[in-house]
Image (tube, helix red, strand yellow):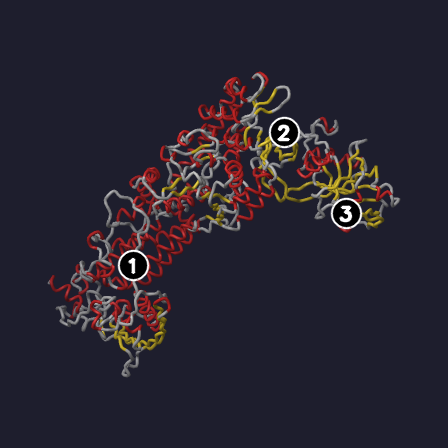
Amino acid sequence: MLLCRVSAVSQTLARWGRRSQRGGGLLHCALSFSSSHCHGVSSGEAGSQPAEAGSAQGLYRDTVILPRSEFPMKLTGQKLLDRELQIQQECGFAGLYSWQRERKAKKEFCLHDGPPYANGDPHVGHALNKILKDIRNRFEMLRGRQVHYVPGWDCHGLPIELKALGELGTSGLSPLQIRQKAREFAEGAIARQKAAFQRWGVMADWDQCYYTYDGAYEAAQLKVFQEMHSKGFVYQDYKPVFWSPSSRTALAEAELEYNPEHVSRAVYATFPLSTLPPAIASEGLQSVSVLVWTTQPWTIPANQAVCYMPNAQYSVVKRADNSQLLLVATERTASVAALLATELESVGTFTGSQLEGGICKHPTILDKEVPLLPANHVTMAKGTGLVHTAPAHGMEDYSVASQFKLSVECMVDEDGKFTELAGPELQNLSVMTEGTDKVISMLTDSGALVKEEQCVHSYPYDWRTKQPVVIRPSKQWFINTASLKDKAKEALQKVRVLPESARGSLLTMLDRRTYWCISRQRSWGVPIPVFYHRETGEALVNKDTVSHIAKLFKEKGSDCWWELPIEILLPENVLQKSKAGPVSDYVRGEDVLDIWFDSGASWAAVLEEEMEGDTEEPESRLSWLPTPLREPLVTESDSRADAYVEGKDQIGGWFQSSLLTSVAVRNKAPYKSLVVHGFAVSEKGEKMSKSVGNVVDPDVVINGGKDPGTPAYGADVLRWWVAESNIFTEVQIGPTALNSARDSIGKLRNTLKFLLGNLQGFDPRVQAVDPKEMHYIDQYMLHLLREYSIKVTDAYSEFDAGRAIRVLQAFITRELSSFYFSIIKDRLYCHPEDSLGRRSCQTVLEEILDGVTRSIAPILPHLAEEVYLHAPGHAEGETLFQSGWIKSSSVWRRPGLEEAVEGACAIRDSFLSSIPGKNAAQYDLTIAIEPGLLFELMESLQEEATSTSSQLAELMTVARVNLTSVLPRDLPPDALLSHGSFLINLEGGVIREDSAYSIAAVPTAAARCPRCRRYTTDSADCLCPRCQTIVSPAH
């Protein structure tokens, strides 16, 4: 292992070589043994016999200190599951969150939980999200911060309503009956999800969660609504919205899924010009028809205009096959000719602005005429460059209607069927199916249909029912996001986004949303606190009416909107303050708020100390939370969460709704950082689907399945899978990933058992060795442990548990297993139990055990606490999570130490590469270095010219080391020679020396000691000098 690290030192090492100062110098002298006395071992006992009673090795077995630990190397099946549950019980998992909330801490870390939807069983998406959050929370708690994390659930909305009612539907049920069934369904889903989250080891006070159906939560939400309304951000209007016929309710953009494979019957149709634009009329052209293209023919009966692009060029073209004159964009002429399979001859060209004044005949409604109008939304990407405009069924179309005062008459009802306004031929026909068929038939009959084609394109679907939506006008409540957009973007600039690439998506989604429809025509939700005048329909909503309703909701829950008489909902004193007429003039509204507004206001219910203008004390407002959570989260100037952590689908969902509501009310984002993770997918990268059969159930992962081939992995394997994954992409899960996680934990257990086994009987509180007294390799390991702790801390701080795992595995593989453990076994097993050298090593092993255990604790809390139960050096009953983060010291980095050990390691690597596949212990090694810094560094590891027991010999793992300034000339013919150099960099580069070295490896003439098995004795029936001094007192 080549460790070519260098560091600055605080004093020059030029005097290290002075032998007169070695005894009290910066680095300790190594011990050496000179005795060659042979302790009686008969020749018959010293051969290659197995270590049985009577053999040489068996004779000394009791004098060798081998690792002993009750910590099991492997736990599987029911034993594993029982042990995890036992650990949760014994180590106080359930009370840990409350414990840390009550302790004093200088800093707080607030991770605000995005509420999962309470409509089903826990799945691996939940596991990915909750465990990811828990890893960060446990890390922050371990390093001394007070964690604020209140789990929540999103409890309202249509999916819950539909599942709760099942085949019953809503027919014949009152709103209160629907709400009761929906609440019961949500409560059942919450109970199942909560139990799963606890089994996964997620730290929280599970008796104190937030629920969007809780009265106090709803009250806080209404205050957000009131603040936004009073500032003019909330308004009522009649305009096109996404409407789901299958759900019979309006939808917001975030509630849509776009189906890229949707097939529409697109048509090219003509609108004959009854009044030619003056520019065309002056050319003497007559009988010209405007050609339009649409993928939604059912909207043609609602047409109010045809739009053109003012700056584009348009041509009147003549069809070669039938002489028909058509008006199309010049840029689209070639495409249209190819589509119609005929030549198009241009007979006149005009600019878009010259089309002004043109009037068309409606193709399906006799005597109706529609104007040609300019519009900025017209594009040349598809179609003819002339856009059929139906203001009732398009957002851009509605903008044109607003500008030119066109009619926005709706011909489609809540079920997605034509109304009587569409005429008897179309009435009651579903617009997306038979209604489309009939309109196309009407276009054919009128001679307006030029071409029909199948068009595969992206089309919005209801995310709950998976059915296509339509755009239709409706009187709804909206948030004017256009007026909030700039403020929201400004607030986002102060937010850290992980990964940074997600910031662009956040901004794009904001740009796409000009308004947000927040009213829904359902029963299971928070009622919009609005009353309507019986005669005029005018809305009554102000601070007084909303504050009163919020107070009622807090006391009784939102069911009271339906339960209480209107006289209590709208009392006389409120009417007087509102300067309104008698209560008999008003009826309560029937709409509920969008569930994205529900969850988007969670910052106000869970995080906010005191909303602007709120006269209640924070403790009173948050009385539904446990006492520790009512304390101020942060200073008044900043009540933002440190982090929101959710999947990428929340970019246009909870992240955005939370941002918009918070910016509207408080002029700042509710979060300091956003972490956007990918989705859990199958091992093949496919979306999980029950029909495909690739769904991974986290309960089966933990407890095993009915199939014997589905083992019980336990919660820590599930947590390791989350931590090890690249969360910023799609996260794959399946047998391969889970088996890999289990194997990785198994290797980790093996390392931890080695550490625990060699600490048997060691108490660091009384037997630890001061670092200054340690062997240099031990001091060096403390230095590496400090570097490790810094790296792993940085990884957790960046929400990168995967990097923490890679740092851990590299540390165990390179620094421990391949390096330190291979060097120290002789000292651990064969030195006197209470010797300085062995205690020095044990002190370091205990620090490594402690550091590694704490570093894995956020990811593997069950394993970490299990190790801590076996680990030495702490009071009985103390748990790891109550005892803090990795305790590394800056003292562990000592001047010159790094260069001394790493210089030796460079030489060791050169030596090992010269004897591939052979046992280093069977060689004598001669190291030749010219006088200089490197030579002096090696002398600090070996004072004598030759030694079998110096620290340098231990580090080289050879029989003997000879340290000289030049290789001897009389080397045996079988000597293996190699050369190298090591760059020493001291005093920040002030002292730099590239030192060359040569080494000669010669098979040793010494015999193997029957006790320690090192090749350091004169004959096979004699103990080596070191072992003689240990064994003699016992014999």
- Helix, strand or loop for disc 2: strand
Q: Residues within 10 Å of mark 2 (few under 14, many from 20)?
A: few
The amino acid marked with disc number 2 is: Lys
The amino acid marked with disc number 1 is: Trp
Q: Quadrant of the N terminus?
A: bottom left
Instruction: Tell me where residue 25 appears, x and y as whole percent.
Output: 23, 67
- Helix, strand or loop for disc 3: strand
Instruction: Tell me where residue 306 appears, x and y as whole percent.
Output: 75, 39
Q: Residue at x 82, y 47 (%)?
A: 317
Q: Residue furthest bottom?
A: 969
Can you tell which quarter of the image residue 808 is in?
Answer: bottom left
Please name whichever residue, 482 or 823, is drawn nearer the observer in this view of the structure: 482
Q: Which mark is residue 153?
A: none
Quick check: can you spot residue 681? no
**Horizontally, is 277 left or right of 219 in the view?**
right
The disc, 2 or 3, on the residue closer to the chain's N-terminal end is 3
Q: Which label lies toward us, 2 or 1?
A: 1
The amino acid marked with disc number 3 is: Ala
- Helix, strand or loop for disc 1: helix
Which residue is labeled 2 in the image? 475
The disc, 2 or 1, on the residue closer to the chain's N-terminal end is 2
Q: Residue at x 25, y 54 (%)?
A: 757
Which residue is labeled 1 in the image? 892
Rounded to the nearest whole Å, what is the CA distance between mark 1 and mark 3? 77 Å
Q: Which mark is residue 329?
A: 3
